Amino acid sequence: MCGITGYAGGGNAAEQVFEGLKRLEYRGYDSAGMAIIKPSGEVSVVKKQGKVDVLKPYVADMRGAIGMGHTRWATHGKPSDINAHPHFAGGIYVVHNGIIENYAELRQQLQSAGETFISETDSEVIAHLIKLNYGGNLLVALRTTVKMLKGSYALMVIREGEPQIAVAKRRSSLILGYGDGENFCASDRPALAGKCKRVSILEDGDFALITAQKIEIFDENLNPVNRPKIENTLTSEKLDLHGCPHYMLKELREVPQTVKNTYSSFAGIGEKLKEVFKGTKRVIFLGCGTAYHAGLIGKKYFEAFARVPAEAENAGEFRYKNPVITKGTVVFAVTQSGETADTIEAVILAKSLGAKVIAVTNVIHSAISRHADIVVPVSAGAEICVAATKSYAGQIAALYLCALTFAGKDASSKEYKQLDALCPVLENTLKEINVYTLAHMCACSNGVYFLGRGFDYAVALEGSLKLKEVSYIAGEGYPAGELKHGTLALIDGNTVSVVLITDEELASKSVSAVEQVLSRGGKVAVITCLPAVAKALKNKAEVISLPGCNKFLSPLVTAIAVQELAYRTAVILGRDPDKPRNLAKSVTVE
Ligand code: M6R
């Protein structure tokens, strides 16, 4: 949440920072700002409420070779020009991603010392503290300041008259990019795509000084330290929309490739995974939102293939329930970004109680990876849309392969081959799917309920989340059997119930749920890969027929249908599916 980026070099810093912010906009988009050091050493600032484009008219006039910017997801203080970053005091300018937990007391102390505040943010205290702590060395002032802060931060600081950017990091990600006569820093890799060949990922407690000529990294005591320089494989071409109107659609179309890539990258870790699994008696899946929903499917895979006790839990709940971790517990941390604070904190707790940790993530060098015994890659590539699509598919594929490995199956098993063989089926599903009628039904409804049993229930939860997230239509995901225990009271002619039916053994039960809704006058749509169900219901409900596949892999197929439905409904309603209101992609606050 919140994106920050900085540039020092021969180019036009304002253009570079603006471009970096555009690429980080998925991290927050309620306000944005930039600070650029002019050739005279003075600093020019612009900060505005709204998406990054509000800065565009100012870029041409902001001349200078060094600068930094911020795109915000508000935590303290409503979105406004004043609350937008950079914050400043006495020639010190700061952009911050994270939360300063003790800001209220610091603010009071600073006010007592005569400092005047203009914003409602937690971040403004940082600028005042650096101003007061400055004794001729910006880095030293920054270190003295961060020692006074509780919470999380990725910070960039500039000072009038000093041609450099000082940065500090703790529990919020920060990446440095080594260019040719120019250097970069940013919260996340998309800002650096195609800009530099190598990047370093800062560790908690690190500081750095960035100029056009060099990047110097220091540890928490300001001793010089080396961090590995890794290849920057992300190109700007990979961030292109490739003719799609939205990232959500583009990324949905990349589901088959994601499954293929996740399958291939798994080959490299199978043996090490077996080592980690030794002595495992119980498996817990932790994640938030879509990642939690993938964990629900992972749980079913482990129970079915390995008959091992498995649980899936929302990471934010797990952390505060005084969890029971018994000997032989393995925790799967499922997280696309690898940055989600709730998941990271839950994993730290589980680890401290003796659990082994397996991170299933799309960002291999992310914060979660440092807490994991092994990282299982989700090879989805950059996912820009706030709503997760292809990463969900990658997570499911990775968990499927983990469960097979645990059950002693290898690449020669039929189950492995079935996943590999699914990619053309997913491609066809994407080509053939038509949810327009259903999307119109949803767009005109008062509420949409997603129902299913078994794997279909797990995907029903995800379908409901996705529709709410991008179209703002209320609804819920339910086990189909639960309907008659309460939710049926909500059904009327203005509601739509989307019933997923893919498991032959459970089909007749789910069809009963369809009949229950129909007899209360509710509108029904059925998403099924069972021809007999499609035939039986075609005159009673809107039927979306999907290709047949085994029930364990059905979530990959039905996920495409519910994600496509959410996307089409959002577009009909004129929403921006890539940047839903009030949200941000990486949720780095608890
Ligand atoms: O990066 P993570 O996978 O840890 O993110 C977890 C959730 O915030 C995320 O899946 C969220 O629910 C998505 N925006 C849903 O589309």
Image: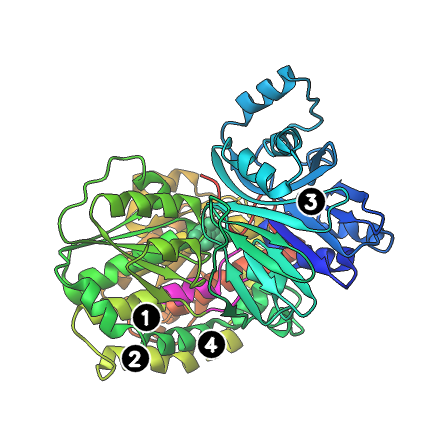
Query: CA separation, marks 3 and 1?
Result: 52 Å
- Relative placement, left or right, of 132 versus 171 is right
Residue 239 pos. (x, y %):
61, 68
Residue 61 pos. (x, y %):
87, 52
The part of the chain drawn in magenta is 380-396
Which one is in front in this view, the residue at disc 2 or the one at disc 4? 4
Which one is in front in this view, the residue at disc 1 or the one at disc 4? 4
Q: Which amino acid does label 1 sit on?
A: Leu
Question: In the image, is residue 557 above or below residue 480?
Answer: below
Query: CA separation, marks 2 and 4?
Result: 15 Å
- Residue at image coords 67%, 70%: 180
| Circle nearer the N terminus (2, 4) | 4
Labelled disc at residue 257: 4
Labelled disc at residue 418: 2
Q: What residue type is labelled 3?
A: Ile
Query: CA separation, marks 2 and 3?
Result: 55 Å
Which one is in front in this view, the residue at disc 3 or the one at disc 1? 3
- Residue at image coords 26%, 45%: 350
| 286 within the magenta span | no
Labelled disc at residue 299: none
Query: CA separation, marks 1 and 2?
Result: 8 Å
In terms of image quadrants, where is residue 23? bottom right
Quadrant in which the C terminus appears = top left
Instruction: Quickly name the residue at label 3.
Output: 158
| Secondary structure type for disc 4 | helix
Residue 223 pos. (x, y %):
48, 49
What number of labels is visible? 4
- Relative placement, left or right, of 238 versus 160 is left
| Circle nearer the N terminus (3, 1) | 3
| Secondary structure type for disc 1 | loop
Q: What residue type is labelled 2?
A: Gln
